[in-house]
Amino acid sequence: MCQSSIHSELVIHLFCFLFFCFCLTKLRGSVLYCRNPVSSCKINYCEPNNSKCGLILLGNSGAGKSFIANILLGEDRFQHAYRPTAVTRKTDSAELTIGDTTYAIFDIPGLIEAKQEQIDLNKTEIEKAFQQRPLSIILFVFRSCGGRILDEDLIAFRAINEAYQFNLTSLIFVLNNLDPKRDSEYEGQTTALLQEILELKQIKLCFLDHIDVRDNEARENYRNELALFILYCTPNTHTKRHQIKLHADNMKQLKQKMKQMQLDFQEQIALRQQEIKELQIEYNTYKKSIETEINNLKQKLAQYEKQKSNCIIL
Ligand SMILES: *[C@@H]1O[C@H](CO)[C@@H](O)[C@H](O)[C@H]1NC(C)=O
Ligand SMILES: *[C@@H]1O[C@H](CO)[C@@H](O)[C@H](O)[C@H]1NC(C)=O
Ligand SMILES: *[C@@H]1O[C@H](CO)[C@@H](O)[C@H](O)[C@H]1NC(C)=O
């Protein structure tokens, strides 16, 4: 089977990245000379003149998009939960630098709403972000409840993906706020479930544990883990192929459909043991490699960011 592993690919990339960082420290700021040897490692530089590409965070409200954006930025730039008093919540963007790439990071309101006019407003907000930064990396954040993915989130992703047909090399799925003591095959199972329901193969899924935001080290590890995923993504130009089709009237029916698909998956789980096990092993291998290297990476990223000011980037 061609389940060739996104995570083992990430492991290779991780080593390439560390090599790249090593090379940077050796060459003291001459990024220029370092690029060629590592370009085969698929680490991405958005554009030759370093113009910004987008990092577009999508997901329904309450998924933790602002939380993620703030951690990446290292400051409380975006507002967390939207205030009930706020009439509209407009799309907002900020600058985020990871390695030598600067992204325009967008925190976009969710899509699913009870009223059609609200859904339409939110569609417009999503479209605006893609108009501003067609060249982008997409982070789609799912909410889970007791390990189960929320049906509304599956609906939202399918609707947006139908309109934009995201290139998978630019797409990261994030599961945020997970119980650190979750089932030992949670990652494998969730990956298999999402691949089935979203009808996609070899998706990149980033599983993030619940953290105490006051814990600096936890925040930093969280940031680094996400940063790695972002670095290994290839930004692509995303253009709208169709309108985002989503109607409040159909919501009940769609939810029922998603619920049924999740139930069907659960029923077939015994038949999928092998697939799930393989996906889990892949994930564990990746995770282990990250844990051993994350301290290294932290230092190297910091060093890199310090050196960056001395670099001439062509
Ligand atoms: C540099 O970036 C700007 C956008 O900021 C773009 O308009 C311009 O065409 C780019 N130049 C090159 C040489 O790519
Ligand atoms: C959709 O947009 C409305 C208006 O901009 C906003 O109040 C609401 O929070 C958004 N929905 C979600 C799920 O974020
Ligand atoms: C997706 O992006 C990659 C990398 O930019 C590219 O090689 C590939 O052709 C794209 N796939 C599609 C279907 O556009």
Image: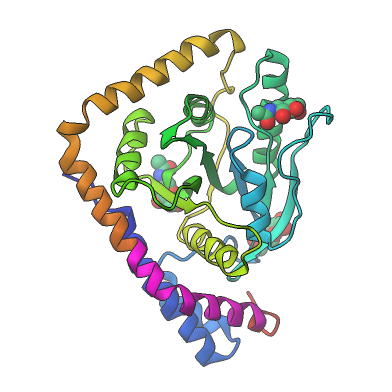
Q: Quadrant of the N terminus?
A: top left
Magenta-drawn stretch contains 288: yes
Q: Tell me the residue at 53%/80% (across/down).
A: 300
Q: Is residue 302 left or right of residue 255?
A: right
Q: In front: 211, or 242? A: 211
State the count of labels.
Answer: 0
Question: Eyeballing the image, is 58 above or below 13?
Answer: above
Query: Is any atom of residue 312 visible in this view?
Result: no
Q: In this view, does 135 lie above or below 291?
A: above
Q: Taking 202 as reference, is 29 above or below it?
A: below
Residue lying at the far front in this picture: please name it: 181
Q: In this rendering, would 11 be left or right of 43?
A: left
Quadrant location of the C terminus in the rendered image: bottom right
Magenta stretch mostly in which secondary structure? helix
Residue 223, x across and y down, in percent: 56, 62
Q: Is residue 180 above or below residue 193?
A: below
Specify the quarter for ligand 1.
bottom right
**Location of residue 287 in the rendering, given as x and y in whole percent from the top left corner:** 36, 62
* Quarter of the rendering containing residue 62: top right
Residue at the spot x=69%, y=85% of the render?
A: 310
Q: How is the image coloured?
A: rainbow
Is 195 situated left or right of 114 in this image? left
Magenta residue span? 287-306
Q: Position of residue 283 (x, y in %)?
A: 31, 55
The answer to whether one can see residue 224 in this image is yes
Membership of 91 in magenta stretch: no
Considering every residue shown, the one lying at the far top of the view is 249
Quadrant position of residue 249: top right
Give the percent coordinates (x, y) of residue 98. Answer: 60, 66
Q: Residue at x 21, y 27 (%)?
A: 268
